[in-house]
Image (cartoon, grey):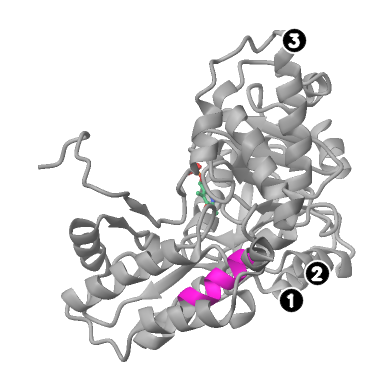
Amino acid sequence: MLTLDFHPTGRHFLQIPGPSPVPDRILRAMSLPTIDHRGPEFALLGKRVLSGMQKIFQTKHPVVIYPASGTGAWEAALANTLSPGDPVLMYETGHFASLWNNMATRLGLKTEFLGLPGAEGWRRGVQADMVEKRLRADTQHQIKAVCVVHNETSTGVTSDIRAVRKAIDAAKHPALLMVDSISGLASAEYRHDDWGVDVCVSGSQKGLMLPPGISFNALSPKALEASKTSKLPKSFWAWDEMVDMNKTGYFPYTPNTNLLYGLAEACDMLLDPQQGGLEAVFARHRRWGEGVRAAVKAWSLEIQCVDPAVYSPVLTGVMTPEGIDADAVRKTIYERFDLSLGTGLGKVKGRMFRIGHLGDCNDLTLMAALSGCEMGLKLSGVKLAGSGVQAAMDYFAGHPAPQLLQKAA
Ligand SMILES: *Cc1c(COP(=O)(O)O)cnc(C)c1O
């Protein structure tokens, strides 16, 4: 029977691409007593997380922290920079791009949803040349923003944000570049200032290893400038009071104090120079992605992403053979092995499942997840060409993790 106090022995394997498992270090940090958010110590915490998040986004410009899920920060990005009826160019990479597009429509923006025809668009990243072509055709510069998803969590496909920036510049178009890196940040390489992004949206429960509940906007001077004339209604989401008060380490309304303790700890973990800092974080997730894909290839199952240049280091989308319901496979794996995998969303419902390799992982947690997948696939009657578990073991054993070698030295 399903009850909330059902606790099988050992630990649950939460291998969905967000929320990701929360490390003990972060859980302990969050267990401190809640302090006065107007008191003197709070300013220290506020300043610490704000500057930590600037380092994670790789920006010198303001980062805004909201007590909301990622969806709230999506709305904030649009509401702070745009006006009713503004044309915006959004690019369809998958389910999350579609949801952001729906939101923009609901907010009264005139969206154009660009993408490759048919199923192709959900298997590849943003085609920067299509963006450039569309912007060149907009000689009157009516399009006010280009919105793209950095890591499409529904498919396991990333997009080349630098190429989108170049496309906008090549077209000499003034549109803002807005990026959803809700699941990319802190697992996949992201460089806010260097890539020339105007607004980046992110959330706590993916690469940052926190529970759900806080989300972010990273800004650019151009985005701040646009916010001065933008006319979409906003109050809770408004950047002006937030950025102003944040200078002193405080917030205009009650922030999620305990989640911020966790965030401070997450920043320390991710930026730790002993562990190699952010570059090492990106390398770790690239390597885990390789190992997981080695398993999928050995099974001879199809990976949802068909362009190896944009394979996601955050998750892998695995397609099940024709006639096999991916959700039935997931159900078997959950019930038999206490392992949660991501469901197929939107257009790919029932056709694929997703293995998360974001946030707090190591080789052995991924080996456990792959074992669960392999057993569950076999139990579901899927004919596998070979052992993915063996292939992943060979990959991990043959490609040692650099930071563990350092520890041994
Ligand atoms: C998780 C996610 C969202 C939605 O965030 P919520 O925290 O569920 O509101 C949006 N975009 C992407 C790419 C995501 O991975």
According to the picture, the residue beneath numbered tag 1 turns out to be 129
Q: Quadrant of the C terminus?
A: bottom right
Assess disc 1: are there few (<14), some (14-19) or many (≥20) residues with their C-alpha within 10 Å of its C-alpha.
some
- Whether 380 is drawn above or below 111: the answer is below
* First of labels 1, 2 by sequence position: 1
Residue 298 position (above or below residue 235): below
CA gap, disc 3 and disc 1: 51 Å
Taking depth in this image into account, of 197 and 360 the one nearest to the observer is: 360
- Does any portion of residue 155 appear in the rendered image? yes
Q: Which residue is mark 3?
A: 40
- Residues packed near mark 3 inside 10 Å, few (<14), some (14 to 19) or many (20 plus): few
* Nearer to us: label 2 or label 3: 3
Tell me the amino acid under the disc marked 1. Asp
For the magenta stretch, what is the residue range? 284-292
Q: Which mark identifies residue 91?
A: none
SS of the residue at dot 1? helix
What residue is rendered at 48% in x and 40% in y? 24
Q: Which residue is mark 2?
A: 167
Identify which residue is drawn at 70% across, 8% down. Answer: 39
Q: Nearer the viewer, mark 3 or mark 1?
A: 3
Q: Position of residue 333 (x, y in %)?
A: 24, 63
Q: Give, as a three-letter code, the residue at label 3.
A: Pro
Reading the chain from its start, which is encountered first: label 2 or label 3?
3
What crowding class fits label 2: few (fewer than 14 Cα within 10 Å), some (14-19), or many (20 or more)?
many
Report if the CB atoms under discs 1 and 2 are less than 8 Å apart: yes
In terms of image quadrants, where is residue 310?
A: bottom right
The amino acid type, in three-letter code, at marker 2 is Ala
